[in-house]
């Protein structure tokens, strides 16, 4: 049974899909998807970034972060990589704002 809330969620999803932020993310993602080798490198880069941000607090964490930052700057010299990662970040920030607004509005902690 489809509820009124389900219908509103679908309307909201459609509105998200109509934003420039989402459309740009899809455009950049599709470009990357057409280049499997580059996509693999980006996926590895994103995985390492995640692991670095969520790993243990080892002694050499600052050194690892510095090295990763330097690698990131070189990696992003490729315009396709930079365009994709920028679009992805903008979309993630938009969705984070949505989640935060909903949680705050409902008093959900």
Image (spheres, rainbow, N blue to C red):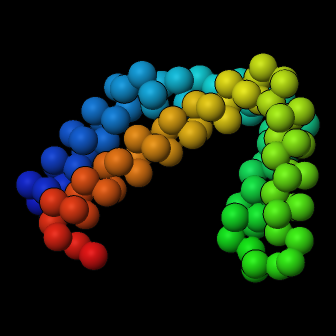
Q: With 16 as the anchor, is 52 left or right in this view?
A: right
Task: Give 7 or 66, whichever is nearer the viewer.
Answer: 66
Residue 41 image offset from top left, x and y in percent: 87, 43
Q: Residue at x 85, y 52 (%)?
A: 66
From the top left corner, tell me how far across and down residue 80 is, in percent.
76, 23
In this view, 21 is above or below 65: above
* Residue at 24% from the left image edge and 41% from the top image edge: 12
Seen from the viewer's position, the closer of residues 10 and 91 is 91
Displayed quadrant of residue 47: bottom right
Q: From the viewer's perspective, is residue 24 above or below residue 17?
A: above
Residue depicted at 31% across the width and 49% down the height: 98
Q: Nearer the viewer, residue 36 or 85?
A: 85
Look at the image and tell me whether residue 2 can be seen.
no
Q: Quadrant of the C terminus?
A: bottom left
Q: Quadrant of residue 30?
A: top right
Q: Residue 101's spot in the image, x, y percent?
A: 25, 53
Q: Tag count in the figure?
A: 0
Q: Return the residue nearer the eye: 107 or 3.
A: 107
- In the rendered structure, the answer to whether residue 55 lies left or right of residue 61 reads left
> Looking at the image, which residue is at 49% across and 38% down?
91
């Amino acid at each position: 049974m489809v509820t009124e809330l389900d219908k509103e969620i679908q309307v909201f999803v459609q509105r998200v899909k109509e934003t420039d932020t989402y459309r740009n993310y899809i455009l950049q993602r599709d470009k990357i998807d057409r280049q499997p080798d580059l996509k693999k490198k980006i996926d590895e880069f994103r995985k390492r970034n995640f692991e670095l941000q969520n790993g243990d607090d080892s002694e050499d964490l600052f050194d690892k972060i510095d090295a990763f930052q330097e690698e990131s700057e070189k990696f992003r010299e490729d315009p396709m990589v930079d365009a994709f990662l920028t679009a992805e970040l903008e979309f993630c920030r938009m969705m984070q704002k949505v989640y935060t607004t909903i949680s705050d509005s409902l008093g959900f902690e």
